[in-house]
Image (cartoon, coloured by chain):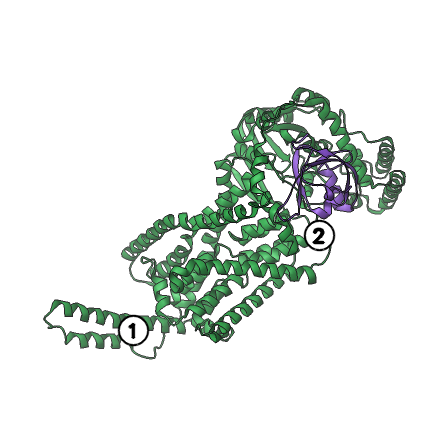
Chain colours: A purple, B green
Amino acid sequence: MLLSDMKEGETGIIVRIGGNGALRRRILEMGLIKNAEVYVEKYAPLKDPIELIVKGYHLSLRVNEASQITVEKTGVFVERQ
Amino acid sequence: MPTTPKKSLTIALSGNPNAGKTSIFNHLTGTRQKVGNWPGVTVEKKEGTIRKYGYELRIVDLPGTYSLTPFSIEEIIARDFILEESPDVVVVIIDSSNLERSLYLATQIRELDCKVLFCLNMADVAKSRGIKINAAKLSELLDVPVLFTVGNKNDGIDALLKTTIELAESDSVTPQKRRVRYRADIEKAIKELGSVLTAELGSALPYNTRWTAIKLIEDDAIVKKRVQQVAGSRDKQIFESVKSQRDALMGLFDEEPEILTTDERYGFIAGIVKEVHTTAVQQRVDISRNIDLVLTNRFVGFPIFILFIWIMFQSTFTFGKYPMEWIESAIGGFSILVDNFLHDSLVKDLLLEGIIAGVGSVIIFLPNILILFFCIAIFEDTGYMSRAAFLMDKIMHLIGLHGKSFIPMLMGFGCNVPAIMAARTLESEKDRILTILITPFMSCSAKLPVYIVLAGAFFGPRAGTVIFLIYLLGIVLSIVTGRLFRSVLLKGADAPFVMELPPYRVPMLKSLMIHMWDRSKIFLKKMGGIILVGSVVVWCLTAFPQQVSYTMDYDAEIQRIEQTYQAFQPAPEMELMATIQEKKDQEIQQLRMAQAAEKAEKSYMGRIGTAVAPFFQPLGIDWKGGVALLTGFVAKEIVVSTLGVLYAADDAAEPDALKKALLASDVSPLSAFAMMIFVLLYLPCLATVAAIRRETRSMRWMLFSIVYTTTVAWIMSFLVYQGGRLLGFA
């Protein structure tokens, strides 16, 4: 499923990162790499952007950017990790 | 060969944004900081020189970055500084609670062939989160000295300095052990390309061969250009080899090589982190996360955000009132002093009416500006700024902007110059230009004195509401402008919104003060320079020509009145006497004001005003207002001082003199409102125009901004004034 389809409080493992050029590189550099675990902390009040926890820190990206990332949902956790 | 001890060292501080780099820099340099710009660009460059342990240490704060790709100006600057200026030591400041991501930048710096020291900062935060880092192991694995610090508590800073000096003086070559090793196919490509580079360029190669080869394989635009420069005609072989290596890798992995190397670097880091990093099982409550449950909450997030902005503006004005009064009375006292000490002369007039009145009417806004910048510094240092961007991104995106554009726009309420400079945090050129073009509609603090005087004079108790409406109009027009430009002028894809939300932090007073002071300095510099000159010029234009032929002989008329009232002199009752005296003073006062006004009208300034009057006339702005607006190009605050001179309210000792003079004139509330709108929107001040030119690096965008803002200002004022008249508000 796409990262943008995940709900608040869900965890997934990144399977594939699409997109192109600068955006893709940026996403990777911030630690959203294949096999990394992501936790959807919350959506902004206006449903965009998303706040994620990845590699122990909080990162936000837009919904359409998150839709470039394919994840495998691993579960629903109330607490991180 | 004996070496003489080196007494002067350059130390570069590098690290991720929010890693606590600034607080370490502040502790190291204290007040001995110089804030300037990196050459050619206007990214803020901070450096400070200190003397310690017998060395002269030049400490340079590099821009905070996550990586060293050539995608953002900050990253290019940081990389170029290390490569081209070869600092003696590069201190990489690492957020201990964020080791994995921090190491991404750190390992890249380590590959740049410089002496590197890792500083594990915010060790206390990491500890409280149950994170343990084995520094000795990390040091051993990466072959770099590793230290713990707590920047905001000044812990470990001395040790950091000592180790840095030791490292600079040691003969140890740059770390060679355990560099990032890529998968065999990439390593093969690096090696092959490396030998092509050595064969073609040899010692002419500006950087280390391996690094250059990696960057060329990653298609790094800047390194490509640099190699092209040194290679000259030999560049063909090199770039053919680069292309074939890249193509081969893409064929093998169906991925761009730069994606592969990023992946592998993280892989390398993961290995290291596994060896040195342990997290205790039990986790304490994450305060920052709990704060965000409220501050970015679906329901209360926005109301709280609006509340914060409201508190910021409210405190700017309420707390600013008291020091304003003190400054006001100090200026009043000073001008009385000057008045008593100097003989009547042109110099005295210049000093009193030109310089003291001009600069004085502006400097009283210093408290407002200090408070506003202090509030913005709080937003930044606590980490709330990025939450504001998180909340606002959807809205900003609708205008065609990035959530981060909100930050420069918010700063625009303080001063457009740093705001336009802050637009640099935007990575995309389009976003940057659009933000720069919109920012002047954010009513800067220099325009506030104008509103305070006009609204204060004409709208009394409703002044606050009127000023709020003006600010609101600026915001609405910026939205309209954003949408318009995005769909007409600056079309194209949006820049990625990938932003860290750093943990909330208790701001340090020292750092808040430094932040506030750095920005307010710009205001004070304007005071000493441009506003001083502006006031003198305006005064000269108003004071000359000295001899004016009046339409009537005012002095004779005054004498006549004196004589007429002399006849009443023997009136018996004291009360009647007082009334008569008052009436006489009033008549004389009126004559004197009429004389001053006529003199002003016949001065050079008046002539200019009369010439431009047809432009302002449909807006309900008279020639005096027109002149004031013209002088406002120098700096918006000057509008007030010009009005002060033109309405002959030169009595600096009396604070409300100008308001009274305005009320007594034929300016109506409607035309005052139209004038406020014009002030809000028309061309930005000289310093801002210069900043726009610098930041867009284009004369055309600068001219465009001037024409666009002035056109919008004229149209809006016209609509409001003429519309208001039709509705009977004249």
Residue position for label 1: B591
- Asked whether, in this view, residue B30 is left or right of residue B578, the answer is right
- Asked whether, in this view, residue B134 is left or right of residue A19, the answer is left
Identity of the amino acid at label 2? Asp
- Asked if residue B287 is positioned above or below residue B237 in the image, the reply reads above
Q: Quadrant of the C terminus of chain B?
A: bottom left
Residue B421 visible at all = no
Identity of the amino acid at label 1? Leu
**Along the line of sight, the residue nearer the viewer: B590 or B115:** B590
- Asked if residue B172 is positioned above or below residue B106 in the image, the reply reads above
- Asked if residue A23 is positioned above or below residue B278 in the image, the reply reads below
Q: Secondary structure at mark 1?
A: helix
**Chain of the residue displaying label 2:** B
Residue position for label 2: B494
At a point 68% along the width and 48% down the height, the residue shown is B427
Tell me, for residue B498, which label it has, or none: none
Q: Quadrant of the N terminus of chain B?
A: top right
**Residue B239: quadrant of the picture:** top right
The reply to whether discs 2 and 1 touch (Cβ–Cβ < 8 Å) is no
